[in-house]
Amino acid sequence: MTKKTGFTLIELLVVVSIILISVGVAGDLVVSIVRTYNKTRILNEIEQNGNYVLAKIEYDLRNALTISPALQNCSTATSSNLTITQRDAANNTITIDYRLSNTPESGIGSCSSNCTFAVQRSTDQTNFYSMINSNLKEGVQIVQASTPLPGFCLISSDPQTIRIHFDLVQAPSSPGGKANQATQAFERIVVTRFID
């Protein structure tokens, strides 16, 4: 009698079951890693854009000679526009405009369903550029949050203390969709140096 070598049906079924379980666990692990990566990337993009905008506006406010329009008290309203007059290194007077806007990037035309809600800046009072990455796939947008209202407002007039507040959310077409929806509030209180 010859001895037969090979695997029994039970042994093959056990091995196939173990392989299927291992592939399922590894697949879940890969999906989890990709989701975590996307969520972290979105949060980093939002935080980087918000911190840049706050730092730039704060710098300009601290060195402002004048601010217009006259800001209202934070308990009543906020302004979505801010004009700052200051001196440059050559002691020339320059005007810087900020606006929380929902107009197209070019500043021309009206807002439709494809608007970019952005923080915009101009140094010539006509050509505004977005200070945030407003790319519809990977960028961020301002959210119209109800409390506190986004914009600029006056906390105190002596010394002049201004609150800047806005909320940023990921762009509507960014990876991860609604499952990775991220929103972050940004607020800074700035005391001006040179305004009487």
Image (cartoon, rainbow, N blue to C red):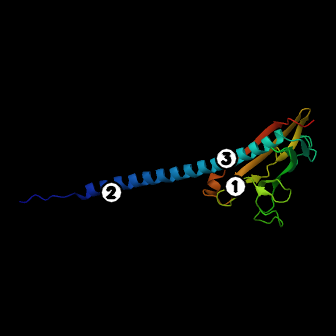
**Amino acid on which the number 3 mark rests in the picture:** Gln
- The residue identified by callout 2 is 16
Where 107 falls versus 52 (above or below)?
Answer: below
Q: CA distance from mark 1 to mark 3?
A: 10 Å
- What residue do we see at 59% from left, 47% from top? 40
Which quadrant is the C terminus positioned in? top right
- What residue do we see at 78% from left, 39% from top? 188
The x, y position of residue 146, in whole percent, is 82, 48
The x, y position of residue 85, in whole percent, is 88, 46
Q: Residue furthest front?
A: 90
Q: Is residue 84 visible?
A: yes
Q: Quadrant of residue 118?
A: bottom right
Direction from residue 134 to residue 146 in the image, left or right: right
In terms of sequence position, does the residue under pointer 1 or pointer 3 come before the other?
3
- The residue identified by callout 1 is 133
Classed neighbour count for the residue bearing mark 1: other residues with Cα under 10 Å, few (<14), some (14–19), many (≥20) = some
Where 146 falls versus 103 (above or below)?
Answer: above
Direction from residue 51 to residue 69 in the image, left or right: right
In terms of sequence position, does the residue under pointer 1 or pointer 2 come before the other?
2
Q: Quadrant of residue 13?
A: bottom left
- The residue identified by callout 3 is 48
Q: CA distance from mark 2 to mark 3?
A: 48 Å
Q: Residue furthest top?
A: 158
Classed neighbour count for the residue bearing mark 2: other residues with Cα under 10 Å, few (<14), some (14–19), many (≥20) = few
Which quadrant is the N terminus positioned in? bottom left
Badges 2 and 3: C-beta atoms under 8 Å apart?
no
- Name the secondary structure under disc 3: helix
The x, y position of residue 71, in whole percent, is 91, 44
Circle nearer the viewer, 1 or 2: 1
Name the one closer to the observer, 179 or 66: 66
Q: CA distance from mark 1 to mark 2?
A: 49 Å
